[in-house]
Image (tube, grey):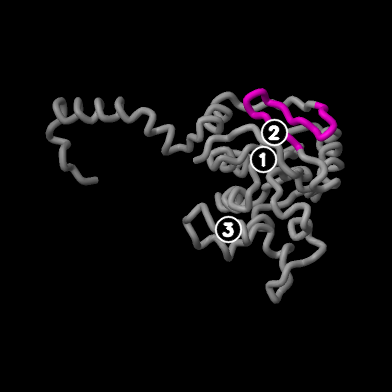
Amino acid sequence: MKKFETFSGVAVPFPGHNIDTDRIIPARFLKTIKRTGLGVNLFNDIRYNEDGSEREDFVLNQPAYRKSEVLVAGDNFGCGSSREHAPWALTDFGIKCVISTSFADIFFNNSFKNGLLLIRVSPEQRDALLEDAARGENARISIDLENQKIVRPDGEEIPFDVDPFRKHCLLEGLDDIGITLQSGEKISDFEAKQKVSKPWMQGARV
């Protein structure tokens, strides 16, 4: 997982409430176990026409937002099923951060484990950021995870809270496997001791 670094990017306004994971990535695209390749199908059923052509009125198909890195969303973003493919699709598209007033719990946990920063703000702050995002390429929003602040285009700073452990994992680029590998030496020591203290367990099959 890549380390999360401070960046300034174009924010896409996505004000709809209760956007569920099936809207983010429809179920028919869940056959893959790879974290890459799903960005093209992000919001597929509202992003494309039945013939596969782009819907001109969909925000991500508009020139100003094709390379957006921040998504400012309505309430309860990521509700519905627990599919991990939802944060995969967002990050593969290029989204590094989603800002909303609230998120579904499972989506919230899955996102952090896959390098996607989720930030909770007040309704008033969210509405202000939606207005910023609506200005397109001329309004870039900065995300500073280290100092836990969003910087609006006019320079106003919006502080946010984040769990210290999740913050550490994002800044260091650590997923569950990476965290486990940090204890590689201790794991090896434990296995060596087990071979000596419980030799009858070697080669055992469950």
- Provide the secondary structure element on which disc 1 rests: strand
Image coordinates of residue 93 in percent, x first then y, are 63, 53
Which residue lies under the disc numbered 2? Answer: 143
- The residue type indicated by label 1 comes to Cys
Of the 4 image quadrants, the one containing the C terminus is top left
Spot the residue most to the front.
138
**Distance from the alpha carbon under mark 2 to that under mark 1:** 8 Å
Residue that mark 1 sits on: 97
Q: Element at badge 3?
A: loop
In the image, residue 114 sits, relative to residue 62, either above or below, namely: above
The segment highlighted magenta reads 141-156
Q: Amino acid at mark 2?
A: Ile
Q: Nearer the viewer, mark 2 or mark 1?
A: 2
Query: Mark 2 or mark 1: which comes first in sequence?
Result: 1
- Left or right of 198, for residue 138: right
Is mark 2 in CB contact (under 8 Å) with mark 1? yes
Q: Residue at x 71, y 41 (%)?
A: 9
Asked if the magenta segment contains residue 146, the reply would be yes
Among the 4 quarters of the image, the one containing residue 153: top right
Residue at label 3?
38
N-term mark: 2 or 3: 3
